[in-house]
Image (cartoon, rainbow, N blue to C red):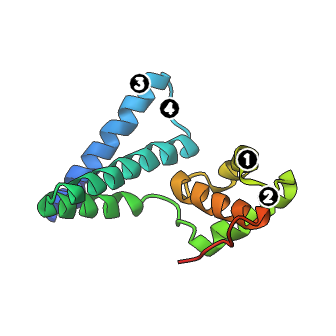
Amino acid sequence: MRASAKAQDVVRRDTLRFALAALHNEEVAQRRELTDEEIVGVLTKQAKMRRESIEAFEKGGRAELVAKETAELKVIEGYLPQQLDRDEIVTLARAAIAETGAASPQDQGKVMQKLMPRVKGRAEGKVVATVVTELLRGIAGAEPPRTP
């Protein structure tokens, strides 16, 4: 944070301040120091908040706020573990489907329960749920899974 302040990188400085404040608030709430996994969880929440803001600002036609939130998201993502790409999520989802014996979209809960701990902090839940749904529909014969 000091380096970004000295370099007058306002976006990075402010984003780090917000992230540190969120971490501090979580430590106060937990009444103890956070573990590395909990820190990643807090940063993941911060990133998710930025993504939701970007989506809302895009719908509202607020390009300047979209740019600000996007820049903040990039700073936060720099402190998160490498995100899984869709192919890696598909591979992990297929393994979870095989382990749970899921055969239809109604079994999505079982699959997600098995899969989410494996991708925690490395993939957004919305994306994982979409992949699982598509794979389960393909198994049930409703429609083949699609890949972008």
* Sequence-first disc among 1 and 3: 3
Give how far apart the Cα atoms at labels 1 and 4 are.
Answer: 40 Å
- In this image, 102 relative to 74: left or right? right
Mark 1 nearby-residue class (10 Å; few <14, some 14–19, many ≥20): few
Q: Which residue is mark 1?
A: 106
* Sequence-first disc among 3 and 2: 3
Give how far apart the Cα atoms at labels 4 and 2 are.
Answer: 36 Å
Q: Position of residue 97 (x, y in %)?
A: 79, 58
Disc assigned to residue 97: 2
Which residue is located at x 78 percent, y 61 percent? Answer: 140
Mark 2 nearby-residue class (10 Å; few <14, some 14–19, many ≥20): many
> What is the secondary structure assignment of the residue under circle 2?
helix
Q: Tell me if label 1 and label 3 are in contact, CB under 8 Å.
A: no
Give how far apart the Cα atoms at labels 2 and 1 are.
Answer: 12 Å
Quarter of the picture containing the N terminus is bottom left
* Sequence-first disc among 2 and 1: 2
Residue type for callout 4 = Glu
Residue type for callout 1 = Gln
Give how far apart the Cα atoms at labels 1 and 3 are.
Answer: 40 Å
Which residue is located at x 64 percent, y 66 percent? Answer: 89
Residue type for callout 2 = Ile
Foreground of the two, 53 or 138: 138
Foreground of the two, 101 or 35: 101
Q: Which residue is mark 4?
A: 33
Frontmost of labels 1 and 3 is 1
Disc assigned to residue 28: 3
